[in-house]
Image (cartoon, rainbow, N blue to C red):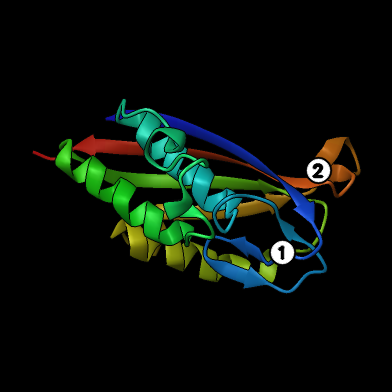
């Protein structure tokens, strides 16, 4: 078994869609980034790659590469899952915490979990997504951005 941790943050800005875990969430702002800026999926990818000793998402999907402009992050996660498979690993479980003052995410969490589970080819029970505020503190509490922590367990396929 191997454990990985991923962390990502994106700035909230007007004129962008808010995508988290492949779910478009109605909100006045979206996340700024080269791809769809799905900060949740990015943190999951970094956790998985880290657990397998395969680097980080910048190594595979650099923000300087026009091929990834506006890319669907769930499609990038499919590629990460394939990298894990080729390296002899499978996903055991993933646990994610989203730090966002607004919007309220509870109604969207089941779909986020299901999207991630489907793309990683695991059962939904193997994926946990939760959200919290930071009580108005820091950049997430001020509504300037959204941060995500993800941890995972991967196992060697045997």
Give the residue displayed 83% in from the left and 68% down from the top. 28
Between disc 1 and disc 2, the foreground one is 1
Left or right side of 29 for 158? left
Q: Eyeballing the image, is 125 above or below 65? A: below
Density class for disc 1 (Cα within 10 Å; few <14, some 14-19, many ≥20) is some
Name the quadrant containing residue 18.
Answer: bottom right
Q: Position of residue 123 (x, y in %)?
A: 33, 62
Give the residue displayed 81% in from the left and 43% down from the top. 140
Q: Position of residue 139 (x, y in %)?
A: 84, 38
| Residue corresponding to mark 2 | 140
Q: Eyeballing the image, is 69 above or below 86? A: below
Q: CA distance from mark 1 to mark 2?
A: 17 Å
Q: Eyeballing the image, is 11 above or below 47? A: below
Tag 1's secondary structure?
loop
Give the residue displayed 68% in from the left and 67% down from the top. 17
| Residue corresponding to mark 1 | 16
């Amino acid at each position: 078994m191997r454990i990985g941790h991923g962390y990502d943050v994106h700035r909230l800005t007007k004129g962008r869609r808010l995508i988290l875990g492949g779910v478009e969430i109605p909100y006045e702002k979206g996340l700024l980034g080269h791809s769809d800026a799905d900060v949740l999926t990015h943190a999951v990818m970094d956790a998985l790659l880290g657990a397998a000793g395969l680097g980080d998402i910048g190594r595979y999907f650099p923000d300087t590469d026009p091929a990834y402009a506006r890319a669907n992050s769930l499609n990038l996660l499919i590629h990460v899952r394939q990298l894990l498979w080729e390296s002899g690993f499978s996903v055991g479980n993933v646990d994610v915490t989203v730090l966002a003052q607004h919007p309220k995410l509870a109604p969207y969490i089941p779909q986020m979990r299901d999207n991630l589970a489907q793309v990683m080819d695991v059962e939904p029970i193997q994926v946990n997504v939760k959200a919290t505020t930071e009580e108005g503190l820091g950049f997430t509490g001020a509504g300037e951005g959204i941060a995500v922590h993800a941890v995972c367990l991967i196992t060697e396929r045997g």
